Image (tube, rainbow, N blue to C red):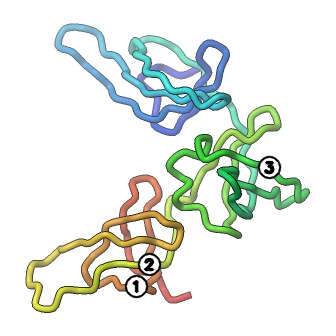
Amino acid sequence: MIDATQIRKGMIIVKDGALWRVMEMQLITPGRWKAMVQTKLRNIQNGSQTEHRFRSEERLEQARLDEIEMEFLYEQDGEHVFMNLENYEQFTLTAEAIGDAVKYLKPNTVIVVEMFEGKPVGINLPQTIELEVTSTEPRLPGATKTALTKPAVLETGAVVQVPEFIKEGDVIRVDTRDDKYLERAKAR
């Protein structure tokens, strides 16, 4: 059991007998009143979303999930197929279950899949991932302002802001938690 103030984005909690993934959370401390935690939750089983406000002293059950390394194989008709590296069993997850992480899935990438009672319920991406830039604007000659950024489309379709010197074909390292460019990666 955890206090409501310990809720974090991405956490899976048990509420009313169902599993809910925390999509957003905000701690609200209104003047003399007691603190509250405002959350946006998504039901893992059926994908429905709701907003719920927890009192700060409320105790919640955090779901205990098994984490298994699996290889992402391919996407077909909105279903993402993963293979268990130990027994080669395949599982599918919908884009809704994966959430925003879907934009970083690249075939043949090893990902940690969260399992609850033998069924996949979500994934944990590594903190950083290396992806190739497939398209971006060329560098502006004569641009003198420092720290300029521009949008870049990565090989998975994700769009991140990158520095001016990044060009198509470069491999960059991206922080998957907040969709930020970290650095240019070493050549593959």
Count the numbered circles shown: 3
- The C terminus, quarter of image: bottom right
Disc 1 residue type (three-letter): Glu
* Residue 130 pos. (x, y %): 51, 73
Helix, strand or loop for disc 3:
strand
Pointer 1 residue? 168
Disc 2 residue type (three-letter): Val
Q: Nearer the viewer, residue 57 or 94?
A: 94
Alpha-carbon neighbours of circle 1 within 10 Å: few (<14), some, or many (≥20)? some
Residue found at x 70% / y 50%: 79
Q: CA distance from mark 3 to mark 1?
A: 34 Å
Q: Nearer the viewer, residue 33 or 106?
A: 106
Identify the mark nearer the N-term, 2 or 1.
2
Up the image or down, 143 lies above or below 45; here it is below
Pointer 3 residue? 91
Alpha-carbon neighbours of circle 2 within 10 Å: few (<14), some, or many (≥20)? many
Disc 3 residue type (three-letter): Phe
Residue found at x 37% / y 65%: 160
* Residue 135 pos. (x, y %): 40, 78
* Residue 134 pos. (x, y %): 45, 79
Q: Which mark is residue 133?
A: 2
Up the image or down, 188 lies above or below 114; here it is below
Q: Quadrant of residue 122?
A: top right
Q: Nearer the viewer, residue 50 or 3?
A: 50
Do residues under tags 2 and 1 come within 8 Å of each other at their CB atoms? yes
- The N terminus, quarter of image: top right
Q: Quadrant of residue 137?
A: bottom left
Helix, strand or loop for disc 1:
loop
| 11 displayed left or right of 64 | left
Q: CA distance from mark 2 to mark 3?
A: 29 Å
Residue found at x 43% / y 21%: 51
Do residues under tags 2 and 3 come within 8 Å of each other at their CB atoms? no
